[in-house]
Image (tube, grey):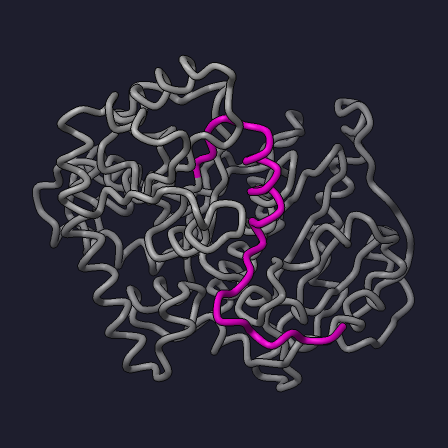
Amino acid sequence: MSVPHPPAILPRAAGLPFETALDTMRVVVVTGPRQAGKSTFVRTYPQTARRPYFTLDDSATLVRVQADRSAFVRSEPEMTIDEVQRDPALILAIKTAVDAAQPQRRGQFLLTGSANLLMMQQVGDSLAGRAYYLRMWPLTRREQLGFGTAGIWTRFFETNPDEWLALVRDEAVPEEDWRDAVRRGGFPAAVLDVRTDEARSLWFDGYVATYLERDLRDLQSVGNLQDFQTLMQVAALRIGNLVNYADLARDVRMPASTVRQHMNLLETSYQIVRLPPYMRNRTTRLIKSPKLYWNDTGLATSLSGGTPTGAHLENYVLNDLLAWRDTQIPRPEISYWRTAAGAEVDFVIERRQELLAIEVKATANPTPRDATSPRQHNAMLARSIRRVPGQRISHASRIASYQGREEGADASINASRICFASLSDIAPTRAKAASASVVCTR
């Protein structure tokens, strides 16, 4: 695979589902964290670049909209409205205009928002049956390189596991220390416009300040912004941990109810991700609390003030998975798996009645022991597979390592099919101290 030269405007993985949505639905809503590239995407995409564009970040436009929302939405046959969460009442006017249009027009309204409109209490209607919601996350590494894609997760489903190692080896992507990729993150401005760690730190400081002083206030009045920022910093130190509101409340000296409300705001504005547990099996005692991750590892490391760890690598892989998931139609489900006894799989993808278990390891030399939890996960599902019609789990007896060394099956693996896939599509390196592996089972 040749590596494309990054163009002036980087192609995004969301392009294909975006086109499909425009040709199918009357309203398309592109949401995601601020500075993820939504505005640039909708203003430069060939199908939407020439349509009238309005941003509610512009105070004059916001005043015009709020003066007469019905007149505004009827002023153009089709339009793009950026940062629509700044006037939630506009959604009802859009619904009325869409329903009144004869004949119905596909792609009549293109909206963007830095908040999950479906989670905002101020939004009076979800536009059900009229709108498609497309989430856009910060740039994946492949998007940063100009490929316009996320990782090769679909190909793991489409390829026989015996061929996974060759699949990974064939990916010709420039090498990079994963820790550098984690520190950089994926916000376009932090990736493309900032060249030093010091400058990037200043950029993230500005991002947090803007989020607190403007974006957060659009969602809800928060009494003490300094306390809210402290919660963000504490949450950034708990990447990959189960969400425990009582512990967070104790650390930041807030009531647990306030912490829960603040965490809801962080999730609504796409700052954090609360990853749900995989709950298909009801006979095994499983952990039910969500796990905590961030929208961007660069932001998370900036907030925590630390150096990248294995938890940050895990978060980096999840960020790529989320970007991939939200370009798929229908969307796969991503969760984690953990038993009360401590067996755990970092991520479980459920796609079209197939499962892919993923274990992330910040090591150059994964061993069969790294597959213990995925093996237990597969064994559990094999016992309960009758509960999921059509669900498939494959079995074999070979283990392939990231570096290409192959070993005979170990008795402890229970003959599960396992592949140690490198992060060549995310952040590869040959340096032992900075190598990383992903253990995939299906």
Q: Residue at x 88, y 71 (%)?
A: 407
Pinpoint residue 131: horizontal percent, then vertical percent: 48, 27
* Image quarter (top left, top right, bottom left or bottom right) of the N terminus: bottom right
Magenta stretch, overall SS: loop
In the picture provided, is 182 more to the left or to the right than 405?
left
Quarter of the image for residue 185 reads bottom left
Q: Residue at x 8, y 41 (%)?
A: 223
Q: Is residue 431 above or below residue 130?
A: below
Residue 67 falls in image quadrant: top left
Q: Residue at x 20, y 32 (%)?
A: 65
Q: Residue at x 19, y 41 (%)?
A: 61
Magenta stretch containing residue 4, yes or no? Answer: yes
Q: Does 39 sit left or right of 170 as displayed? A: left
Residue 287 vs residue 98, the one in the foreground: 98
- Give residue 236's quadrant in the image: bottom left
Between 82 and 219, the one nearer to me in the picture: 82
Magenta-tinted stretch: 1-29
Which sits in the foreground, 135 or 362? 135
